[in-house]
Image (cartoon, rainbow, N blue to C red):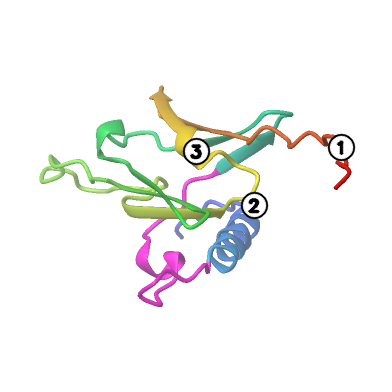
Amino acid sequence: MALVRYEPWSVLNQLHGQLNRILERDFDQAGASSAATADWIPPADIEEYNDRFVLRLDVPGVDLAAIDITLDKGVLSLSGERARPADTKDVERTRTERPYGRFHRRFTLPDTVDAANVHAAGRNGIVEVTIPKQPKAQPRRIQVASA
């Protein structure tokens, strides 16, 4: 008789992954969804402040220099790849819980962002993208001149 490990949260984790793939179905110019072109989707946190948005993605094991970040027509795209370890020839059994391969995330930004001053930094497997907001237009009083 073989013992099988019961993990009650595995079904919930699978459902969460499926929901993330459904939510990621933003179509790019080629018509392919990001979920269809990605092997995994890194989790993200988004915070809004008075003057900026801050986006943090968990990408442990990914070379930060190989992450491609683009901002085009109000859509922020992040993509990269986590490679499998190369030295697995002597392994007899394996249990893999961390996904490998290409990832892709897209975020639609509001019109109030300052696209020229977006910057990104990475540390400890976390990429942080800071997206400043444009200064709010202040109302001004216009004098009516007599003709």
Of marks 3 and 1, which one's residue comes earlier in the chain? 3
N-terminal-most mark, 1 or 2: 2
Asked if residue 4 is positioned above or below residue 60 in the image, the reply reads below
Verify whether residue 23 appears in magenta: no
At label 3, counting other C-alpha atoms closer than 10 Å, the crowd grade (few under 14, some 14-19, many 20 or more) is: some
Which residue matches tag 1? 143
Disc 2, SS: loop
Q: Nearer the viewer, mark 3 or mark 2?
A: 3
Residue nearer the viewer, 10 or 145: 145
Q: Which mark is residue 58?
A: none
The region drawn magenta spans 25-43
**For the residue marked with disc 2, what is the amino acid?**
Trp
SS category of the residue bearing label 1: loop
In this view of the protein, which residue sits in the foreground, 147 or 139?
A: 147
Crowd around label 2: few <14 · some 14–19 · many ≥20 (10 Å): few
Of residues 32 and 41, the one nearer the viewer is 32
Q: Which residue is mark 3?
A: 57
